[in-house]
Image (cartoon, helix red, strand yellow):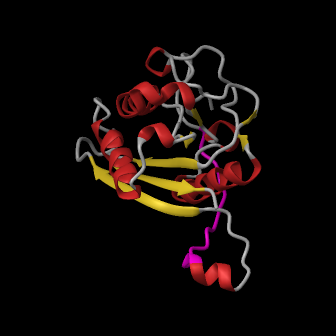
């Protein structure tokens, strides 16, 4: 797939699975568990716009991310990385980029965003868990996964560091992972490095 690219024409369906184990922080720490990060906020929204398409103005994506940051008590300027929903659909990518620009505005210069679906395809029901794992590993390693196959950035996505083609070294203390489903069922998680 080609997320955020001018020539994108739809997602590539894929297969996979991922499991994220959630545990109370103090309990995990007491038993010496390896902690990859902490979920500090979440946000949900529903567009109820169309059976498969999100609302064209990106309001659902915006509201999910805004609610997640509010729940986490995190200012947009503190976010280092977004693991985008980034499906490579002509409508969806533009909507997500518009929502990100609206919410992050002046903070765009210090933030990066990429779509791991460019490497693994769209895992549908497993996408959220696997992308949360990518996000946690980015915090652990300080390496952002690239948006592969990105040649010409589409107009709504210009001005966002989309980590084109190659991985990027970057310290990630706060990250957002977006999952925007068919029909505008939206969820965003905010994670913190520990």
Q: Is residue 96 found left or right of 129 in the rendered image?
A: left
- Can residue 150 be spotted in the picture? yes
Q: Quadrant of the N terminus?
A: top right
Count of numbered badges drawn on the protein: 0
* Location of residue 126 in the rendering, given as x and y in whole percent from the top left corner: 57, 59
193 w.r.t. 108: above or below: below
| Magenta highlight on residue 16 | yes
Q: Residue at 68% of width from left, 25% of height from top?
A: 164
Q: Residue furthest left?
A: 48
- Can residue 91 be spotted in the picture? no
Q: Residue at 68% of width from left, 69% of height from top?
A: 35
* Location of residue 39 in the rendering, given as x and y in whole percent from the top left corner: 52, 62
Q: Residue at 72% of width from left, 77% of height from top?
A: 33
Q: What are the residue bounds of the magenta stretch?
A: 12-25
* Location of residue 103 in the rendering, given as x and y in whole percent from the top left corner: 36, 34
107 w.r.t. 16: above or below: above
Q: Is residue 49 found left or right of 97 in the rendered image?
A: left
Give the main secondary structure of the magenta stretch. Answer: loop
Q: Quadrant of the C terminus?
A: bottom right
183 w.r.t. 58: above or below: below
Quadrant hosting residue 32? bottom right
* Location of residue 22 in the rendering, given as x and y in whole percent from the top left corner: 56, 74
Q: In front here: 136 or 18? A: 136
Q: In front here: 157 or 106? A: 106
| Magenta highlight on residue 189 | no
Quadrant hosting residue 61? top left
């Amino acid at each position: 797939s080609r997320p955020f690219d001018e020539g994108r024409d739809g997602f590539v369906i894929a297969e996979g699975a991922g499991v994220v184990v959630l545990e109370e922080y103090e309990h995990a720490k007491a038993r010496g568990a390896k902690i990859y990060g902490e979920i500090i906020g979440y946000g949900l929204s529903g567009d109820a716009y169309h059976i498969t398409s999100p609302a064209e103005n990106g309001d659902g994506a915006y509201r999910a991310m805004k609610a997640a940051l509010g729940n986490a008590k995190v200012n947009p300027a503190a976010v280092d990385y977004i693991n985008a929903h980034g499906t490579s659909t002509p409508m969806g990518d533009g909507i997500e980029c518009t929502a990100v620009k609206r919410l992050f505005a002046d903070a765009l210069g210090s933030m990066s965003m990429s779509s791991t679906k460019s490497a693994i395809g769209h895992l549908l029901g497993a996408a959220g868990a696997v992308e949360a794992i990518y996000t946690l590993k980015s915090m652990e390693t300080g390496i952002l996964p690239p948006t592969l196959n990105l040649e010409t950035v589409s107009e709504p996505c210009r001005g966002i560091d989309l980590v084109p083609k190659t991985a990027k070294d970057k310290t990630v203390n706060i990250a957002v992972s977006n999952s925007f489903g068919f029909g505008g069922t939206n969820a965003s998680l905010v994670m913190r490095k520990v």
